[in-house]
Image (cartoon, helix red, strand yellow):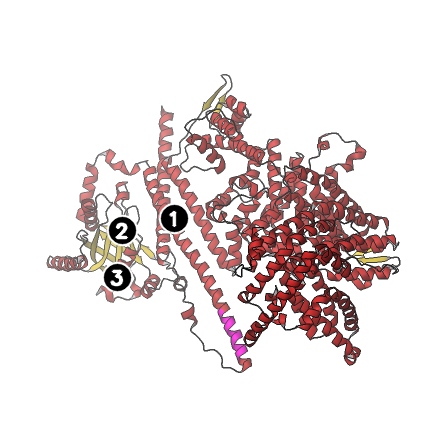
Amino acid sequence: MSRFFHAGSDSETESESSDDGIVDVRPAGISRAVLQFSDDEEETKRVVRSEKDKRFDELKGIIKVLKNHKKIKDMANVLTDFESLTKAFDKARKVVDREGLPRFYIRTLADLEDFVNECWEDKEWRKNISKGNSKGLTTVRQKIKKYNRDFETQLTAYRENPDAGDDDAEEEDESKPAAEESDDEEMAKPVVKKEEKAPKAPKVPTGDDDDSDWGTESSEESSSSEDETPGIGHLTAEYFLKSTTEQEAQRREERKLEKKLKKEEKEGRRKGEEDDDEEGWQKVNSGAPSQAITEKPKLFAKDQEITQEAVVKKLNEIIIMRGKKGTDRSMMIELLQELKTIAEGANLGKPLSVKICFNIMAAIYDYNPNIATCMKSEMWENSTLPTIQELLDTLVECPDIQVSEGISEENEQLDKSPYRIRGCILTMVERLDEEFTKMLQACDAHSTEFVERLKDEQAMCDIITKLESYLETHGTSEEMCRIYLRHIEHLYYKFDPSAFEETPSDQQDKTSQAIMDRMCKFIYAKDNTDRLRTRAMLCHIYHHALHDRWYQARDLMVMSNLQDNIQFSDVSTQILYNRTLVQLGLCGFRQGHIRDAHNALVDIQSSNRAKELLAQGLVPQRQHERSPEQEKIEKRRLLPYHKHINLELLECVYLVSAMLIEIPFMAAHELELRKRLISKNFHHVLKMSERQTLTGPPESMREHVVAASKAMKNGDWKKCRNFIINEKMNAKMIINEELMASLDEPTQIVVMHRTEPTRLQSLALQLSEKVGSLVENNERIMEIKQGNYFFNKSNVIGNKPDQRDNYQNQNQQGWGGRGRQQRNQNRDRGGDRDRDYRGGDRDRDRDRDHRGGDRDQYRNRDQQRY
Amino acid sequence: MASKRGMDSQVEVVQIDGLVVLKMVKHCQEEGAGGTDLVQGVLLGMVVDNRLEITNCFPFPKHSEDEDFDQVSVQYQIEMMRNLRHVNVDHLHVGWYQSSYFGAFINRALLDSQFNYQHSIEESVVLIYDPLRTTQGFLSLRAYRITPEMMKFFKESDFTPENMAKHGINFETILEEIPIVLRNSHLVNALLCELTEKTRKEQKFSSLDLGTSSMLEKNLRQLMECVDEVAMDTNKYLNFQRNNFRQQQSKQQYILKREQENLQRKQRGEPPLPEEDLNKLFKPLPTPQRLDCTLVAGQMDSYCKQICEFASQSLAKLFMAETLHVDQSNSN
């Protein structure tokens, strides 16, 4: 309070903005707590600019556009501008309450009214203009008349002294009057605010508000603002647009005069207020009809007959607002919902409600301006899910409703069968699914919130199944592929315990395996976009692997040739590929295919970035910081927790299989000059433990594996088995000629033979290696010579390994690939690996593609973001 | 006199006096530190029909790092030849000899000097003597000369790939080997016969040594070095290709842009932009020199041949030894 008193002492140095900052905080806090649907965008941007600036800038922007439209007498646009202006003003009400009615706003209103009247008088012109224009003119005329009634006092004041506000204001000019004015304002403020809180509470637009609620409450609101506007009309004169230097001096003169006038005026007013605060409230309350009411829920006049046409017209009206600056998106949803209840109440038939449903969904998807943030859970539960379910149910029930993207707005047929409606239910559901994933991503995986959300997975699956059966009768095969893939993606990672039980024959086609098989095969056969097929195949393999069907999984993997071209696919598919590979490795391990398991896992593990490669979390990078956008993109890519693969299990399996291969290998090739490492990671772990001066009994998984490896190294397989298990190793190795030893049956002795390579032999080996690399270099030169497009070639040559290493993880040995030489080579080019998978342009392209699919839905968003 | 001969009477065979060989071996033994240091000397003789007869030689003085070494050696050679003429020995300069360490002789220095020789004295050859291999039981002595194509090519001293292709130069056509015939006077032959009878048995079989690995090892090492060198050179070439391609691309872009600009200017009626020297803007990259690489390749080739030869001989010896061994055990 001392601040206020301080300010009250007429100190002219107190700058406007500092006051601003302090006052700003409180109402914002309150309102956000109350307004659950408040904008996310608002939240983020608030940090940068004060709300006032933002709101007023918005207003100014609209005014500018309005002016332009006025110039060309485009009445239809003037109307929309006017509407958005009032809307934006409504939004800015909070600021206006605090700062006072901006002068420029009044001026715009006055000008607009004058302009409209002028146009109205000009009968010649009116005759010539287009229908839309004249319609706009009429509407604007009516509206502005009505609207301006609320601002009568200010308008008259303005008209009396039109020049007063006409000046542009630089800060120094402005600070004086501003400070003064804010004094006055501040005196009144505490009182106002207290009262404000109470009426504001019911503004919570939870979706079940009705009109009357809104009406009263907003009228109160507007009144409160009105209350203080006269005195502070000039406060925001800094927003006025044009300024020329010659006028400056004159203006200053004027301003002084004006100030005097104002002071007197204020003095009087304050007295009045102090006398009777209550009365001030009452007066305004009754005097001014609500502003918001003109704006919001007057969907239909009371006596208006609700017909299909009327509803459609209204609907179009609402839709037109979409994407405009300053359109309150949450309000739009409500309006649409309202419209739907009205339409249903009037029994206007299913097609109409389907159409409205589509629009509601679009509005809901529009709601969030930011791709990164997810839908509010309330909205999800209360509007999104039910709407889409209802939509689906209706569509399933009424087979005569034809829904398609291909139907244009004009060709819609809502009144008679067969009904035709524009819209794509598949896109809606796909979008819903994405939204669902986003919500899961946003939750903390260990909170109950996540569990709550995850429960909706079932609902999601139901929706998808329902849509699937709907599309099976109505959709094209392409659409079916899409929905099948959705289904598959909800299915593939779920372990089906019944897979290992005997299923009765009549249930045979109900198992997840059968479903997967059916859907995947459909996609293999019908799909013509490579992406869907690839994804379906990966999911299929994953599913096989998850259920220990090793050979099926492996064969599918080998047949798919994915390891060769996966690097050309988008990032999320690459992630899926990694997941599949890992799952395949785990499966191989369970089935005892140690080498295969190792090969499958080695690339994921060796980079130490398993977490990132599987999109299960971000790993801090050493070389370079991520930019915030990059981080956002990556965060969007992360998988929700329930799809995660246990990383520790992964590492354990990898290390154990590495141990089982590496230790015998080390023993077999002990004497080789150049040590070849099968698994760098394993060696690293081993080395780390050797470096420790004191090794206690193993505790963590890693230590166990290390201890086991040591035991194995010493040939103590029993001890090794105690840590992990495997006794067959030694005999097996002899059979495989890996161990130079012979088994002496009667005495149960293993006789070890050792042959050292002669110097000559080792030299020859070295030479052959060198020659090998030379040949490879030469081949590269040849490739360049043959292909004229060096860079295309070199991209293939140069970048392939990186990408592979980063995201693709080929395991050529296991899957009939190119053999280990190349892999080693890749490893040699280790420098490049640090480059990241997301650095590429492809990511950006992908994002674009991703949005391109349903560009309509995103249009607003894009506009707002750029 | 000899140098005036035309190309038609090319030297087809080199006939070396035993004296020359012995002098070379002696020189090598005494000054070459058992073959590790290189020794060089001058060959004297004359061309008769299509045969180059080398009848005498004398060593170059030992290398010193003095700046005026060349002058001194030239001085020394002239002096030496004059003296030899006084004692009525063949004094015509027909080439030079050099010792080599396991056949490592194909290099730039050799090529340079041989070029100089052949440039001034057309029929000159270089004799390569390999002391190490000689101690293995085989006298290793080869005569080489630069091929005519290579001479032309080398004269231009433009070692770009294009030029090389034009002259059809590759590692096989740098040097050609000329067959060698050793000739001794009858008196010497008679002496040798007498000596053969006097030598003990075991000394005769030094050439049947079965140990192969040290030879092969050394050869492999050298081969490896060469491979490394070639690999490096390959990398260089690869880089060059890449850079070159990039430059070409930007050049194309530039030209295209310029054309468009000119077109626009033309439409606007302005004079076209002046032609600029593209080579100034895009300095052509220096093409990597191929000569060294080719030399290394030639060296590798000779190593390989050497190994092959050695291996076949060794194998023969081994088979022989095996048979002997079996016979012996059978008779036991």
The correct choice, above or below, for B79 with respect to A732 in the image is below
Location of residue A604 in the rendering, given as x and y in whole percent from the top left corner: 55, 41
Q: Over which residues does the magenta segment extend? A: B254-265
Label 2, residues with CA under 10 Å away: few <14, some 14-19, many ≥20: many
- Secondary element at image label 3: helix
User: Badge 2 sits on which subunit?
Assistant: B
Number of the front mark, 3 or 1 = 1
Q: Nearer the viewer, residue B208 or A318?
A: A318
Evaluate whether label 2 is on the same chain as label 1.
Answer: yes
Q: Is residue A629 left or right of residue A344?
A: left
Under mark 2, the amino acid is Ile
Q: Is residue A370 visible to us here?
A: no
Q: Nearer the viewer, residue A488 or A812?
A: A488
Q: Is residue A707 left or right of residue B7?
A: right
Question: Of the residues tagged 2 and 3, which is closer to the observer?
Answer: 3
Q: Relative to A62, does residue B145 appear above or below in the rendering?
A: above
Identity of the residue drawn at 66% across and 58% down: A97
Image x and y of residue A41, in percent: 64, 54
Please give the residue where the numbered disc 2 appears in the rendered image.
B128
Q: The residue marked by circle 1 belongs to what chain?
A: B
Looking at the rendering, in which quadrant would you find the C terminus of chain A? bottom right
Q: Could you tell me the amino acid type at mark 3?
A: Asn
The reply to the same-chain question for discs 2 and 3 is yes
Work out how far the residue at label 2 is from the one at label 1, CA to CA, in angstroms.
23 Å
Find numbered disc 2 in the image and state the secondary structure of the residue it sits on. Answer: strand
Nearest to N terminus: mark 2 or mark 1: 2
- Residue to which mark 3 is pinned: B116
Q: Which residue is mark 1?
A: B227
Residue type at mark 1 is Val
